[in-house]
Image: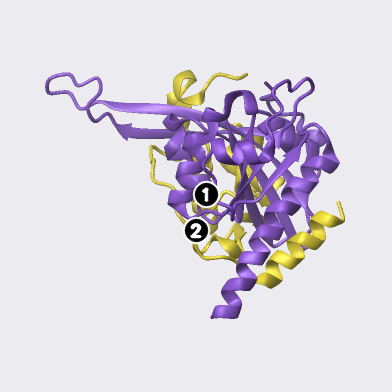
Amino acid sequence: MGSTTSELPSQRTPLTAAAETGLKIVVVGGFGVGKTTLVRSVSEIRPLNTEEVMTQAGAGIDETAGVERKTTTTVAFDFGRISLNDRMVLYLFGAPGQERFWFLWDRLFAGTLGAVVLVDTRRMEDCWYAIDRLEHHGTPFVVAVNRFDGDEKRFSLDEVRQALALGEHVPMIECDARVRASGKEVLIALVDHLYTRALAKESTA
Amino acid sequence: MRKPVDLGDPDRLYMVTGGRSEADASLDLVTLIVSECEPSPGMQSEHVRILELCRHPTAVVEIAAELKLPITVVRILLGDLCALGKVSARHPRAAASVAGLPETALLQEVLHGLHNL
């Protein structure tokens, strides 16, 4: 598991002065599935780590008579960056897929281009919740199956599609999150998918 | 891994934001911030750091990572600096809606950029 924390400020590579548009892609998946590895393999900067503090009224939990309780949760997440050209910069966010982080998702997903669901075939159930939420939000996504070394149970993509009850419209791709070229193919698969959808929408408009 | 700030030093966060907790909702994680002036003497140290960092366009989320402050706190600080005209914000084109797809031209540019990696 690679949640690498920060680096020296002197290693920062600034964007060009012309940079004007930030774009987002979110990588979701279970614990240890390789989200940070994928972000790192394609990012031009070493992945940075940041955190959000969420406060919510503790409805139904820790209720003490007459005392209003609030719970505060800190969620850390990693991100990387790809300068697409002088003007456009793409940020990749690795988001924990567990249900208890739902509140972080709303913020991460707002305005995102789309999402990559990273799957470990040994623990496919880890991404059920993520897929459910993406469908609920109407966020387009692709499913990338991370083929680790010694992935003994090599389920075919069709078998994974069945196990995850994915519709035919959801693109699937195999990858090795450690390899830059492979991570790049995953992102291209997602943006190809987005482009096809946008074209179809424009032609019916 | 550093300590979560909310457990480590809540007083500091309180001081940094002047006790406020409502952030500027218009600032997305990937809104790019650019300094419009140099730091001046007597400025709050976080403001100084932000003005230094943002001599080059820098995303809100990168500022938070560099300052090691939660995103909400950074958005409060940036909201103040924006209101004073000390920084400007370049808002993302795609942030308008979640379900609405961005235009094909934008996606073509993204694809082109990715192929060139």
Image side of residue A61 versus residue B97, left or right: left
**Residue A109: assigned label:** 1
Q: Residue furthest right?
A: B116
Tell me which residue sits at (25%, 25%) in the image: A69
Image side of residue A74 versus residue A180, left or right: left
Chain under callout 2: B
Tell me which residue sits at (66%, 66%) in the image: A196
Q: How many marks?
A: 2
Tell me which residue sits at (48%, 57%) in the image: B26
Q: Amino acid at mark 2?
A: Val
**Residue A71: assigned label:** none
Give yes or no for contact between labels 1 and 2 (Cβ–Cβ under 8 Å).
yes
Q: Is residue B79 visible?
A: yes
- Judging depth in this view, the residue of B18 and B40 nearest the camera is B18
- Judging depth in this view, the residue of B47 and A64 nearest the camera is A64
Q: Which chain is purple?
A: A
Respond whether the residues carrying marks 1 and 2 are from the same subunit: no
Disc 1 element: helix
Disc 2 element: loop
Mark 2, residue position:
B98
Chain under callout 1: A
Q: Amino acid at mark 1?
A: Phe
Q: Position of residue A199 (x, y in %)?
A: 64, 72
Chain B: colour as depicted: yellow
Q: Position of residue A142 (x, y in %)?
A: 63, 48
